[in-house]
C-alpha cells in the first residue's frame, strides 16, 4: 500500500510538471484530499490519483473594484494632506483675484471667494464620506476631513460677514490714491448716508481741492457745494467745504476766468466775511476780491447788453471801494454802460433816457461819454404833428413862435415848416429846447389868414421842446 501511494505521488508530480499549471503538492496532502477525474468522484479508500481543487482567476470587474477600494482607503501622508489643504485655500484666493481683476470690488471678490470656499467644503465632505464608506475609518482621517471642511466654511462665512468693512477699506485705499468718485461709491455701499457722512464729505473736499489746484473752478465749486448742501452734519469736512467755496470763488475771480457766477460769488463772499471762520487773511482777501468781482461783473454785463445792472455793479465799486485800484477802471466803464443804457432807452422810454443822460452828464462829466451826454441833452429836437381837414391850394404854413399875442394877432414866427396836403402831417427840425406857440398861416384871396389853438383851460396852446425826446404833438383840426 505504501508503494502504491508513492507511485501515485510520482505520477501526479510528473503530470503537474508537464502541464506547468499546478504547483508541487506534498504527498501527504495528496493522500488526504479527495480527487476528481473524468467527472467521477473517488472516495478516500480508492486507489485513484488525487488532484488539488481548481481555483478560478479573478474577473476584470473584481480587479477594478479591488483597486478603487485600495485607492480610497489608502492613507495620505502628512505632506500630501498639507498640499491638498493648501490647494483648497489657494483656489479660494485665486477666485478672489480673478473676480477683482474682472472689475468687481473687494466685497464682490470676497463673496465669490466665499462661494468657492463653500463649494470646496462640500467637495471635501463628499470625498471624506466616500473614503469613509470605502473603509478608511481612521480617527485622524475623520478629524482632518472635518477640520478642512469646517475651515473652508469658516473662511466663506468670514468673507460674507466682512462685506461692509471691505467696502470701507477699499474706499480708503481709493481715496488715498486719488480715485475719489470710486471711493465715494464704496463709502455709500459701506453705509454712508447724508447728512452725517464724514468720510464721504471729506472725500468730496479732497476731490474739490485737487480740482482747484488744476484750476478746474466749476468742477471744484460743485464738489464743495455738494458738501455744504448735502452734508451739514459732518463737522470739520463741512467747515472745510465752506472755506473751499470761498477759496474757489476768490481764485476764479482773481484770474478773471470765464463762466464765473458773479452774483453767487459776490453774495457768498460778502456773507462769509461775517463768519467767525473768516480770519484776518480771509478778510484781506475778501476786501481785495470784491471790487474786482464787481468791476468784472459790470463789464461782463455791459458786453451782454444788460446795461442797467452793469451800471449798478460798476457804480458800486467807486462808492463802496473808493481806495481800490479798480475804482478808476469802474468809473470809466460805468460811463460807457450809462451811455449804452441811455441809447437803449431812447426809442421806447425817452423819459428814462433823459434821466440816464442827465446822471451821466452830471456824475461822469470827466469822461467822453459824459461830454457826449451833455451835448445830446442840449441838442435841438424835432417837433412833429398832424392837421386834420387841412386845406390845399394853398396849404397853410406851420409856425413855432417864442412869443405871441393872440389879441393883436402877433406871432414871432421863429420856425416854420410846410404841411403835407394829403396827410396833414408836419415836422419842425432842429428846434432848440424851450417853450413855443403853434400857429398856421395861409394866404387867401382876402389876404393872410392866421389861426392858433387853445389848451383845454382856454389858454393858448404851448409846445414844450425837451431834451432828447423832442415833441410829438396831438392832431389838430384846421379852422
Image (cartoon, rainbow, N blue to C red):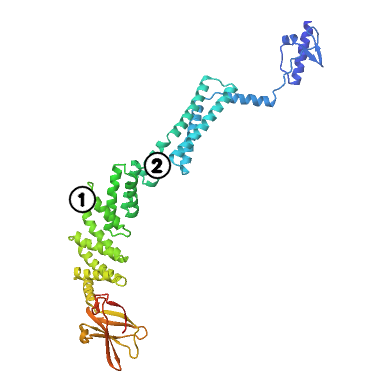
Report the quarter where the N terminus lies: top right
Residue 173 spot, x, y in % from top left: 37, 41
Front residue of 18/246: it is 246
Distance from disc 2 to disc 1, alpha carbons, whole Å, reads: 36 Å
Q: Residue at x 76, y 9 (%)?
A: 6
**Depth check, front residue: 209 or 341:** 341
Q: Nearer the viewer, residue 169 or 432?
A: 432
- Mark 2 and mark 1 residues within 8 Å of each other at the beta carbon: no
Where is mark 1, residue-wise? 281
Crowdedness near tag 1: few (<14), some (14–19) or many (≥20) residues, C-alpha within 10 Å: few
* Residue found 36% across the figure and 41% down from its top: 172
Number of numbered callouts drawn: 2
Q: Residue 230: image x %, image y %?
A: 35, 46
Residue 373 lies, in percent from the top left, at: 23, 73
Quarter of the image with the C terminus in it: bottom left
Instruction: Determine the secondary structure under disc 2.
Output: helix
Q: Which mark is residue 330?
A: none
> Mark 2 vs mark 1: which is more N-terminal?
2
**Horizontal and vertical percent position of residue 408:** 20, 87
Amino acid at each position: 500500500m505504501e508503494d502504491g501511494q508513492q507511485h501515485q505521488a510520482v505520477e501526479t508530480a510528473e503530470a503537474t510538471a508537464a502541464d506547468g499549471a499546478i504547483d508541487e503538492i506534498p504527498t501527504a496532502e495528496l493522500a488526504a484530499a479527495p480527487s476528481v477525474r473524468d467527472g467521477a468522484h473517488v472516495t478516500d479508500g480508492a486507489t485513484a490519483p488525487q488532484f488539488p481543487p481548481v481555483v478560478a482567476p479573478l474577473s476584470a470587474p473584481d480587479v477594478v473594484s479591488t483597486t478603487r477600494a485600495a485607492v480610497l482607503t489608502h492613507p495620505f501622508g502628512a505632506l500630501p494632506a498639507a498640499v491638498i489643504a493648501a490647494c483648497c485655500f489657494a483656489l479660494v484666493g485665486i477666485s478672489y483675484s480673478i473676480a477683482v481683476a474682472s472689475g468687481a470690488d473687494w466685497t464682490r471678490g470676497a463673496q465669490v471667494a466665499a462661494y468657492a470656499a463653500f463649494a470646496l467644503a462640500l467637495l471635501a465632505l463628499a470625498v471624506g464620506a466616500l473614503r469613509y464608506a470605502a473603509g478608511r475609518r481612521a480617527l485622524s482621517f475623520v478629524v482632518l476631513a472635518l477640520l478642512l471642511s469646517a475651515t473652508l466654511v469658516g473662511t466663506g462665512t468670514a468673507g460674507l460677514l466682512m462685506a461692509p468693512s471691505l467696502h470701507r477699506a477699499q474706499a480708503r485705499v481709493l481715496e488715498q490714491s486719488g480715485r475719489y468718485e470710486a471711493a465715494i461709491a464704496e463709502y455709500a455701499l459701506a453705509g454712508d448716508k447724508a447728512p452725517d457722512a464724514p468720510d464721504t464729505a471729506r472725500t468730496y473736499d479732497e476731490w474739490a481741492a485737487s480740482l482747484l489746484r488744476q484750476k478746474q473752478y466749476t468742477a471744484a465749486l460743485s464738489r464743495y457745494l455738494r458738501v455744504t448742501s448735502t452734508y451739514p452734519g459732518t463737522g470739520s469736512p463741512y467747515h472745510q467745504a465752506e472755506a473751499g467755496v470761498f477759496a474757489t470763488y476768490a481764485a476764479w475771480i482773481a484770474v478773471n476766468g470765464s463762466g464765473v457766477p458773479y452774483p453767487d460769488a459776490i453774495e457768498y463772499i460778502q456773507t462769509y466775511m461775517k463768519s467767525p471762520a473768516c480770519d484776518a487773511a480771509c478778510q484781506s482777501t475778501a476786501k481785495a476780491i470784491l471790487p474786482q468781482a464787481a468791476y468784472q461783473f459790470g463789464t461782463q454785463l455791459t458786453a451782454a447788453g444788460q446795461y442797467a445792472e452793469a451800471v449798478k455793479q460798476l457804480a458800486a465799486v467807486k462808492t463802496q471801494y473808493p481806495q481800490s485800484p479798480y475804482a478808476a477802471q469802474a468809473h470809466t466803464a460805468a460811463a460807457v454802460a450809462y451811455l449804452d443804457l441811455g441809447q437803449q432807452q431812447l426809442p421806447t422810454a425817452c423819459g428814462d433816457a433823459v434821466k440816464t443822460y442827465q446822471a451821466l452828464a452830471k456824475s461822469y462829466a470827466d469822461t467822453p461819454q459824459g461830454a457826449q451826454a451833455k451835448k445830446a441833452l442840449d441838442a435841438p429836437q424835432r417837433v412833429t404833428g398832424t392837421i386834420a381837414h387841412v386845406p390845399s391850394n394853398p396849404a397853410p404854413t406851420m409856425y413855432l413862435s417864442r412869443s405871441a399875442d393872440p389879441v393883436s394877432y402877433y406871432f414871432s414866427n421863429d420856425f416854420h415848416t410846410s404841411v403835407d396836403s394829403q396827410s396833414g402831417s408836419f415836422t419842425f427840425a432842429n428846434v432848440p429846447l424851450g417853450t413855443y406857440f403853434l400857429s398856421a398861416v395861409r394866404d387867401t384871396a382876402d389876404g393872410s389868414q392866421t389861426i392858433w389853438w387853445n389848451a383845454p383851460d382856454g389858454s393858448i396852446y404851448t409846445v414844450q421842446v425837451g431834451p432828447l425826446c423832442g415833441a410829438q404833438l396831438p392832431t389838430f383840426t384846421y379852422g
